[in-house]
Image (cartoon, rainbow, N blue to C red):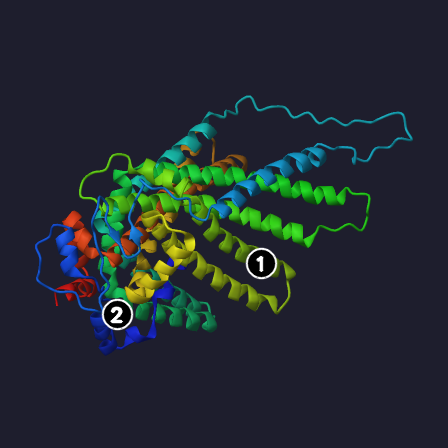
Amino acid sequence: FFSALPLRSFTLYQLIPSLRQKQKEATFRIRINVYDTMQTTALPPQDVPATPTQTATTTNGEFGGSEYGERLNYAKPKYQDWPCMVAFYLMMIAIVVFAVIWGYSVGFDYSSVDTDSSTSTTTTTTTTIEPDEEFSFVGIFLGLIAGFVAGVMFALLWLQCIKMFAEHIIKILLFVSIGLWLVAAVGGVMIGEFELAIFALVVALFFCLYTWCIWGRIPFASACLSISSTIVTMYPGVIVCSIAASVITLVWFFMWVWSAVGYLASVDSSDDENAQPSIVVVFILLVCMYWGCNVWRNVSHTTTCGVAASWYFTSTTLQSPSKGAFRRTMTTSFGSICFGSLLVAILQAIRAFVRSAKKNSGSCIVCLLGCIEWFVRFFNTYAFAQCAIYGTSFLTSAKATWDLFLNRGFQAIINDDLSNLPLTCGALLGFLVSGAVSFLILAAFYPITTDHGLQLCIYVALCAAILSYFVIVDILICVASGVVCIFVCFAEDPAVCRENRPEAFAKMTGRSPAIADMVNQMHM
């Protein structure tokens, strides 16, 4: 889980206490018109007039509105970025058609099998394998089911742990990271690998410095995690949507593989012996594969953000908000999702091409493209949250996201990405728990004292653990999407949270001095 550590949140100015104080006073300040907000949300007025430098945020109507647009407006649907939506559907149809044409014409053609036509006799060697009468598939079936159920139950239990102990989990994981690197340093000294020891010690010191810098942000990140996990458990429709999106992605990937293999096989079976696959066609196929996978993953993310926004901007328990959020995602906001996903898909395809070149100079380009891809993917995560809240186009949402990063605490949003730590750890622990339970069940049916029985138990338990891991990720990724939406909504309008969800507001502001100072600026 070291890769989940949000190293991007570390900045040099956080090392200087005086600048950190200025950060609390200026950078984290959300400049909103408190007087207008109090009136429109039925809060008692504070007699604080808006200054010309403040940005007014209104909260009128059923779900309210702001300078970015009207929130969660299902009454006047408008299909945003519809050309990208049409292009995506045409791309999917084309891939399916090509899979049928190329796959059927090549995949079932056995004419290329070498035969000896000069002889009239054929010698066939048949190997008969006697079945083991004592072998039973009941143990395999029960092992898979038990491992899968154990993984799902662990994911639900981990959600409850996040709701109650998110802050403790984050702190423990940070200290565990430091401890593991120190153990690696000691191990390097014991085996005589002093280069390894020095490297591990430097990394451990870096993690200590990192932990010290972000320690004050842990309470706010844990509060957002707790709130998001509450939303996910309250509205499990987002989990169903996430699992369905993963299944569609898997089906899409196999369909794309069938189409790509069919194209390559058709080139090999052509009459031209010097025929080579077209670079343009291969690049388009890669873009299509990445595009389809990204779209369905972002559909789940946007749906969860819509549900979290509905919870944030209302004070009552909603009835099946997942249906409305999913309907909006697949209709008015689907074009925006396709647009943003296409940008990432193009970068991924270019990166795959450069990586396949296998040149020394290509490694730097691959690293650069990887950094650009990460930033675009991270930026799109918040842009899609804007699409879910306001139903705006992707470009409009991107502009609002950039304005949010610059004017409403860019560093605060980045640093609070600590929420990924418990989620990544939960997925890995669920993988281990599922595999262990499956192995124990299999050990009761098959003897692990023999090589055959031990290998069977290990392979089946590994399959159960992998299956459970993907389901656990589908559950926990909903929490991550909810955290993103809570970030965006709270940074835009914390007064709405104070009015609609006072307990959540107290949890986010009371446990984080930096965020409390930010909100208190509204009363100055």
Of the residues shown, which amino acid type is indicated by label 2? Thr
Instruction: Report if residue 411 is visible in the image.
Output: no
Q: How far apart are the alpha carbons under marks 1 and 2?
A: 37 Å
Mark 2 lies on a secondary structure that is helix
Q: Is residue 511 above or below residue 200?
A: above
Measuring 57% from the left and 55% from the top, which residue is drawn there?
Answer: 349
Q: Residue 509's x, y, as percent?
A: 17, 58
Within the image, what quadrant is residue 131 found in?
top right
**Residue at horizontal 13%, vertical 55%?**
38
Quadrant, the C terminus: bottom left
Which numbered circle lies on residue 52? none
Residue situated in front as seen by the camera: 132 or 99: 99
Seen at 58% across and 42% down, the residue is 256
Circle 1/circle 2 CB separation < 8 Å: no
For numbered disc 1, what is the local secondary structure?
helix
Pinpoint residue 197: horizontal percent, then vertical percent: 42, 70
Tell me residue 449's x, y (percent). 48, 36
Residue carrying label 1: 350
Q: Earlier in the sequence, mark 1 or mark 2?
A: 2
In which quadrant of the rendered image does the N terminus lie? Answer: bottom left
Nearest the viewer among 350 and 94 is: 94
Question: Would you call the spot at circle 2 few (<14 residues within 10 Å), some (14-19), or many (20 or more)?
Answer: some
Give above or below for 200 relative to 503: below
Report the residue marked by disc 2.
27
Outermost right residue? 118
Q: Is residue 347 left or right of residue 56?
A: right
At label 1, counting other C-alpha atoms closer than 10 Å, the crowd grade (few under 14, some 14-19, many 20 or more) is some
